[in-house]
Amino acid sequence: MKKRIIPLLLALALVLTGCGGGSSTDTDNARLRVVTTTYPIYLFASALTRDVDGVVVERLDTGSTSCLHDYTLSVNDMKKLAHAQVIALNGAGLEDFMDDALATSEAAVIDCDEGVDLLPALTSHDVEDGHDHDHEGHTHDGVDPHYWMDPRRAVQMVENLAGGLSQADPDHADDYAQAAQRCAQQLSGWAQELDGLFADARRRGVDIPGLITFHDGFQYFAAAYDLPLLASIEEEAGSEASAKEIVEISQLVREHDIPAIFTEVNGSDATANAIGRETGCQVWMLDMLMSGDDVPQDWGLEKIMEQYISRLKGDLETVREALG
């Protein structure tokens, strides 16, 4: 469905006339205004710019939804984009809703997916047996855009952000490069630590039967920690799975003796609950990191980055508790 986009010139007029709310803040005179499209990018950009004066990092209102397939820019979003000098995108087809806005913007654009090893989009929600029963047909240009769910790929995201910020603000290129190195070191160390969450269980012979998720965004998460992804259903409110699909996933749960299936915290849980009632398995929630609190001004780089990794760690601990 064609999305309704408000042109940037109109958004700027709304800012000048006060339409749509909003008030002056101490960030209005920022030297460099960076607008990010997702919460992980917001965290990474905030960490990279924490020690650089005059940089303000904002994010679009995308945290209000679990899935960006049908997201529409809000008036508040357009206000931010109208004043942005830099726009940082996830890329990989996630921000199709930005096409018209980017066409009329003079801001520098950073594409965080440059050089990232992207996985093909899941085209059927039964990953294991290959049954082809697409749900809503969301393929994001043929690749899976949810690569921020793997901390090793997040290292490349940070490097891309630092490179783009250095081009937009060359006087502080060394600051961004040094911050990126610190972020990368943290991410690499945490990636090794998170690997250990399942290592002990596997050494003791604990069998992890596999994940069934009700959002298509956990492929990178599963691959990063060698968790078999048995099924992935992209489900949104008003587009729940059919009765046939519920029967097929229920059979998969019974076949693998799966004790728990997983929804996304901001997503629909209608089908998952139906399968839970049918099979007796529990329904747990995983976090896609789409939403989160603003970063306090007194937080340093390390603490900002900890917000990202603590959320991933929470997901891993949820999986371990639910399936272990």
Image (cartoon, helix red, strand yellow):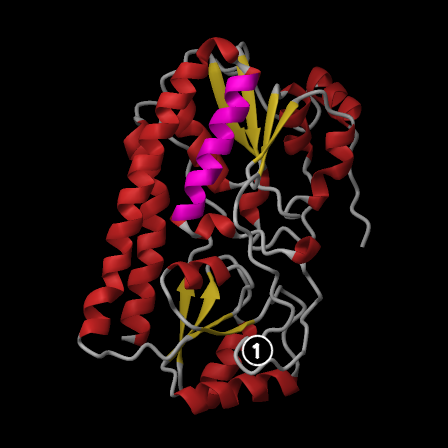
Q: Vertically, is 290 above or below 158?
A: below
| Residue drawn at x 36%, y 25% as measured from the top left | 179
Q: Visible in this render: residue 258?
A: yes
Kind of residue indicated by mark 1: Asp
| Residue drawn at x 26%, y 65% as measured from the top left | 198
Name the quadrant containing residue 195. Answer: bottom left
Pointer 1: what residue? 126
Q: Classify mark 1: residues with Cα within 10 Å, few (<14), some (14-19) or many (20+).
A: many
Q: Position of residue 158 (x, y in %)?
A: 45, 34
| Residue drawn at x 46%, y 29% as measured from the top left | 45
Which element type, helix, strand or loop, lies under badge 1?
A: loop
Q: Is residue 154 magenta?
A: yes
Q: Visible in this render: residue 306?
A: no
Main SS of residues in magenta: helix
| Residue drawn at x 36%, y 82% as measured from the top left | 259
Say which quadrant the N terminus sits in.
bottom right
Q: Vertically, is 27 above or below 140?
A: above
Q: Vertically, is 185 above or below 197?
A: above
